[in-house]
Amino acid sequence: MSNKLLDLSPKLSLITERDLELSEFTAVAIPVTPGEKPQLVKSRFLTALNNFTKLDLNIELANWPEFTAKAGEIIEVPLSAANLTRIYLVGIGEGNNEDLRKSAAAVGRKVKASNSQMLCALSEDKNLITTIAVALILSNYQFSLKSEQKDKKPSFTIYGEFEREVERADVLATAVWQARDLIHTPSNIKNPEWLAKQASALVSSAKNSGLSITVKSGRAIKDFGGLVAVGNSSPKPGPRLVEVSYAPKGSTHWPHVVLVGKGITFDTGGVSLKRPYDAMIGMKSDMAGAAAVLTATVALAKTKPKVRVTTLLMAAENALSGTSQRPSDVIKHYGGTTVEVINTDAEGRLVLADGLAYADLNLDPDYVLDVATLTGAATLGLGRQYAAMYTRNTTLAKKLNEIGDRVGEKVWHMPLVDDYSVALASDVADFNHTADKFNFSAGSVTAALFLEEFAGDRAWVHLDIAGTGRSEVDAGENIKGGTGFAVRLLIEWLDTF
Ligand code: BES
Ligand code: MG
Ligand code: ZN
């Protein structure tokens, strides 16, 4: 198992009015807007259904008085007509993307719980179908290493002629699903070498795609001082630099985007051990940034945007051992900048700094974007719904903000407060890496200021996904654990070139 991608890809089908065969379904989900009268809902849908089925369906609406039809609220109406045993009346709130995502996730959860064959007729609006389909799939995500596996593949049918929208959903959801698989994998399986092999497997499964990959380790990464200092804390196989490139024929003159992902396969904190110890439990997710940039890049083989993409996975384990780095060590990053290590638990920025410097000095990117579960401070500030976004490029910030709202991966534009930069001074090196001077607090901001030092003059964006990369609850589109945050945002953004 350890070298194979877990194959959990969901299945999705589409049905058009012409071939509607209601006997194939055990449940139907239909939308209800707030304030809608029960009688109207009945006539709107039952007439339609009865016309197809030639049955005379009727529904009891006993629970109706408490039902306000806000997004995700569901009434389950038992029914006995051929195979059909349930009608779900689904509140869709305002009927926008965000609300339909909630509604579809609620329907998806019913499918997951009951194993029903669901016909989902939540919307007739083309612009909402992709969102709905993605939420249906993702709410059925599961990850299990139990010795007895329930082999349950979710299956839904979207009602309507929406082939392109559903295909798009399949691309997006598959990429998120793959990222989640990588993030959920425990760290006794998932070391940097494993991550590199997963990347190779994903790349080679996408044939004739313009994708290629190189994996570097050992002497080949000796100039990547941060990656080596962090990664040498763990026994062999040690850190990896994975470079995936999307450069189809004819792409030489296209714009070039570099993505950099934090790929810490486990973060103990190192010598500056994480306390309380429980704070470590979620740290198998500390490669969520790398997972997101990887699977989003692999998806480009299908979406085929006109942009060249180079994706760097900075893969290392931050372990506690005799070869761990020490607080007060000075390391030399790619490109020569020296950094005094203050707290070995701030390891993410050390591996990212090498990636950003390498991008700036070698890859001549038009845009550089890094994604990282970087600071607890980002979670304190914004919670788990918004990622902290840092950039000086307001146009790009706006764009990412809009896309994020649409796809349900929301980002909040945070300030790079120049006054805090003095906190990065060091007595012995170019910088100290935790901004330990002057007590400005603002840990997510100062981490971003540190990273910016390595991005040169490039148009650069940093996404701190410490809060959004992992869900602590089993709700909506997520189970507890890795969410795959940033995958949809990146795929959609890269599609705008
Ligand atoms: N991986 C953590 C950040 C993190 C915390 C991610 C909680 C997800 C949930 C990162 O490596 C870290 O330990 N950051 C430190 C930095 C500090 C020592 C300057 C932090 O945020 O406490
Ligand atoms: Mg850490
Ligand atoms: Zn970390």
Image (cartoon, rainbow, N blue to C red):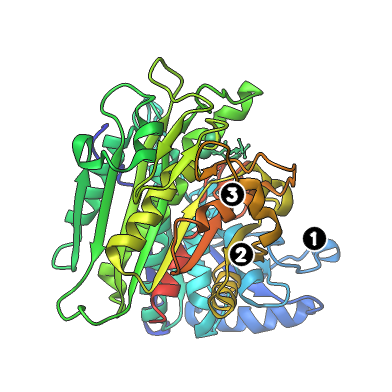
Name the residue rendered at 42%, 78% in the picture.
165
Residue at x 22% of width, y 56% of height:
203
According to the image, label 1 marks what residue? 63
Q: Amino acid at mark 3?
A: Ala
The percent coordinates of residue 404 (x first, y second) are: 57, 69
Q: Nearer the viewer, residue 475 or 161?
A: 475
Q: Position of residue 99 (x, y in %)?
A: 66, 70
Which residue type carries mark 1? Asn
Q: What label does residue 183 carry, if any? A: none
Q: Which residue is mark 3?
A: 447
Mark 2 or mark 3: whose residue is earlier in sequence: 2
Residue lying farthest to the front in this orientation: 427
When the figure is inspected, residue 389 is found, relative to residue 473, above or below; the finding is: below
Q: Pointer 3: residues within 10 angstroms few (<14), some, or many (20+)?
A: many
Q: CA distance from mark 2 to mark 3?
A: 17 Å
> Considering the image in quadrants, where does the C terminus appear?
bottom left
Dot 2 corresponds to which residue?
A: 411
The front one of 104 and 59 is 104
- Residue contact between numbered discs 2 and 3, judged by CB atoms under 8 Å: no
Near mark 2 (Cα within 10 A), the count class, few <14, some 14-19 or many ≥20, is: many
Residue drawn at 28 percent across, 40 percent down: 240
Give residue 461's position: percent from left, percent from top: 51, 65
Q: Residue at x 63, y 43 (%)?
A: 435
Cα gap from disc 2 to disc 1, whole angstroms: 38 Å
Quadrant position of the N terminus in the picture:
top left
**Residue nearest the viewer, comparing 356 with 17:** 356
Relative side of 171 to 349, left or right? left
